[in-house]
Image: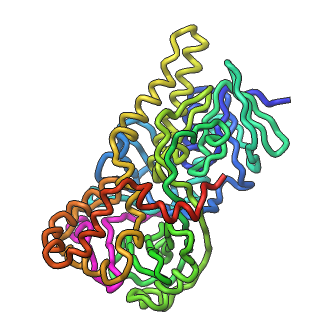
Amino acid sequence: MAKRYDVIVVGAGPAGFLAAKAAGENGLKVALLEKNPDPTRHTRACGETLGSMNEYYMGNITGYNSRDKRLFFSSDGFSFKYNGPYQNLYGVRMYTPNGHKIVIGDLEEQKKKGDYGKVGISFDKDIMFQCLLEEVKACSVDVFPGINVQKVTTTANSVTAEGSGQSFEGSYLIAADGVNSRVAQMMGMNEGRTYYCNLYALSYYMSGVELPEPNVIVRVVGFVKERGAEIFIMPHATEEIHNVSLLSADPRADLEATCDYFMNKAFCAPWFKNAKKLRSFSANENCYSPIIDPYKDRVLVAGDVGSTQELENQGAMLSGWKAGQAISTAIQEENLGLEVTGISQYTNWWKETYINYYDHEGYIKAFTHGLILTVEEEVNYVYGLVKETVPAAWHPYTLGVHIRQAMAKVMPIIQEERPDILQKLQRRSLPATEIYAEVAKLSKPVS
């Protein structure tokens, strides 16, 4: 017999935890289902950063109250405990294969602004999950680890989730099971979405990494066996550790060979001469156009489930919280005999702050390295022309805007000196599906 709840939340990640917390604090009976046996230990590649702390993201500003050890979203008025280590991040550094550096955020100038100069923070995700687990349990959420949801059925008044030999029935279900959401697939919510590609990631915690500058995120692009690939190096919350991620949208790229290239052969190899791998992660992410309507048949999607690739940690937290509040309002309205508006409050917010506000095609084109400029010489030439300091940002959408604006200033030079490269760069104006067409034929969405 199915266990009965007001709301079922599938997925104990940033979105799922915050959805369960919101609904639980409002007095609802909540079941939080997570396929991993230990909800506090993250297992997939993650940059473990919260960005956009110097600007709005999805209608909110994220901050960290170091006095009381709480992460807060001031516009929506919610917060949660995080008592683990963290580091301030003040900008990004992008490097070409020959070592030319594009500065995104002047480190010294940003530090002069104190806490308001940071663009984000790095955090320990395992500790954050432990804090969130304690908070949801404190508001009487029932947490069920080791539940792999394999079936979702709905009626006019309820929804049932089944998996791992157990069944759960609720008035509503919040799908927060990530970018490769099985719930969205089962509910037919991926129908009509445009498939772009898969993004492949291999990452490590590493000690002994020696970067030229502290408190910045580093991105280096390169080519390995003629395949475009890149490495992101992010300070971990624990100062002696870095979070190192290899990424490619090309399924033919060998990420282990890419790791060897950047750490032993590329210009940045000296940064890794004393490095040791401590823990490894991976990810294979479906990249679609967004889900326009995040609600269907008493199922509401939150977090990465409905996004182009990822909402980032803070976007997932924000949408999870909003989803939990929306379901709480809808259940209250139903029980009071009022018109149900809670769901539309969420769907309207989703469309206004995410769907209509951001350039999703522009965002996904950020991973086309190696598909437009196809050899190192071209990348070195084009980005070597960018010598101005770019405004400080660690925001999934405006960072790309800043780079494109810097590139626009050097386009006349490229037009005069290298019309052959200009012709390649013009491919960026094509739809993302055309740019990714070759690699999309070689990959398929993870189900």
- Residue at image coords 45%, 47%: 315
Q: Position of residue 150 (x, y in %)?
A: 75, 43
Magenta residue span: 86-111
Q: Position of residue 353 (x, y in %)?
A: 36, 38
**In screen coordinates, is 144 left or right of 82?**
right
Is residue 97 within the magenta segment?
A: yes
Is residue 310 within the magenta segment?
A: no
- Residue at image coords 36%, 42%: 60
Q: Position of residue 375 (x, y in %)?
A: 37, 81
Q: What colour scheme has been applied to the protein in the rendered image?
A: rainbow
Measured along the vertical axis of the image, is residue 407 above or below residue 31? Answer: below
Measured along the vertical axis of the image, is residue 321 above or below residue 203? Answer: above
Farthest-out residue, top: 337
Q: Which image quadrant is residue 213 in?
A: bottom left
**In screen coordinates, is 387 left or right of 359?**
left
- Residue at image coords 50%, 90%: 274
Image quadrant for the N terminus? top right
